[in-house]
Image: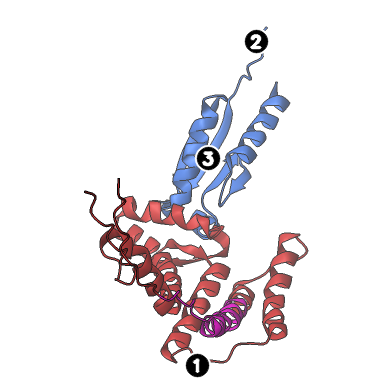
Chain colours: A blue, B red
Amino acid sequence: MSTRPQHPLQVVLYTKAGCHLCDEARDILDRIAEETEFDLTETDIRKDLELFERYRYRIPVITINETVVAEGRIEYSELASVFAALQENRL
Amino acid sequence: MASPASPIKQSQPRRGLLAWPEHILNLLMDHWALIITLVFGLLVLAAFLVPILAFLGLNNLSKPLFYSMHLVCGQIPSHSFYLFGHQLGLCQRNFSIYTSMFLGSLIFVLTKKRIPGLPWWLWVLMCVPMALDGFTQMFGWRESNMFLRLLTGSLFGLGCVWFALPLMHKNLMETEPVPTAPQQPQVPQPAARP
């Protein structure tokens, strides 16, 4: 019997061009992707006025299944532990 | 026959590589306040350069500058100023600290170091608001705002340079130069006879 979840986590990275912390967040997600399976969508907040107003002073913002799990200066250890906890709950 | 040993010419100024440490030391002693002012000024300038370079599309320059400034600042996006839609290299509190330190030390240099120093208790008093604002926010008891970060950071930065720079100047002025030992004329030793 397989222990892999049927649907991978839906991860959204809210970002913007020229956002250096977003590049760092993307690198962290790449590292986590080596161990955890998830679907990543990158969204440029400038394409949606509502998103822009909500996240302009918070990006990078990472949501998993539509819940904000990390924002601003994101640390690998913190985000990895969130992914690990979510994966455990799904197994 | 062995030639007599040549006298050591200690009184002559050092030249070449040996003179560099002395030159650097003299430069630091003469212009220490200006150097401190330049360092603070460069930090503030770099904070502005980050968003300007990003706006111009020069991310290859902006990004390493932003990352290197993380050494002196947490760079929390929600606590930062934005220029052209891009985050400054320093957060609001650090920006106000370093700007006030820069302006304070610039005034100190421009007045030819004549500003009297703060008494220690007034310096502590100027640090207290930032400590209260920062720690109560850090422990999650309340959330600060831009105005408080700027005000308390400026008080702290100004207090630090106003206390430290005149004190440093006073101590450097009071330091007696190390007296050099009087030169003894060296008499050439006669060559040893067999």
Output the chain of dot 2: A
Seen from the viewer's position, the closer of residues A11 and B42 is B42
Q: Residues within 10 Å of mark 1 (few under 14, many from 20)?
A: few
Q: Which residue is mark 1?
A: B114
Position of residue B140 in the picture relative to residue B101 (left or right): right
**Residue A37 on image: x %, y %:** 55, 24
The image shows residue B13, relative to residue B17, as above or below, that is below
Helix, strand, or loop for circle 2? loop
Q: Residue at x 39, y 72 (%)?
A: B184
Amino acid type, residue under disc 2 in the picture: Ser
Question: Which mark is nearer the camera, 1 or 2?
Answer: 1
Q: Mostly what secondary structure, the magenta segment?
A: helix
Seen from the viewer's position, the closer of residues B107 and B137 is B107
Asked if the residues shown at circle 1 and circle 3 are in contact, with their CB atoms under 8 angstroms apart, the answer is no
Q: Which residue is mark 2?
A: A2
Q: Is B134 inside the magenta-drawn segment? A: no
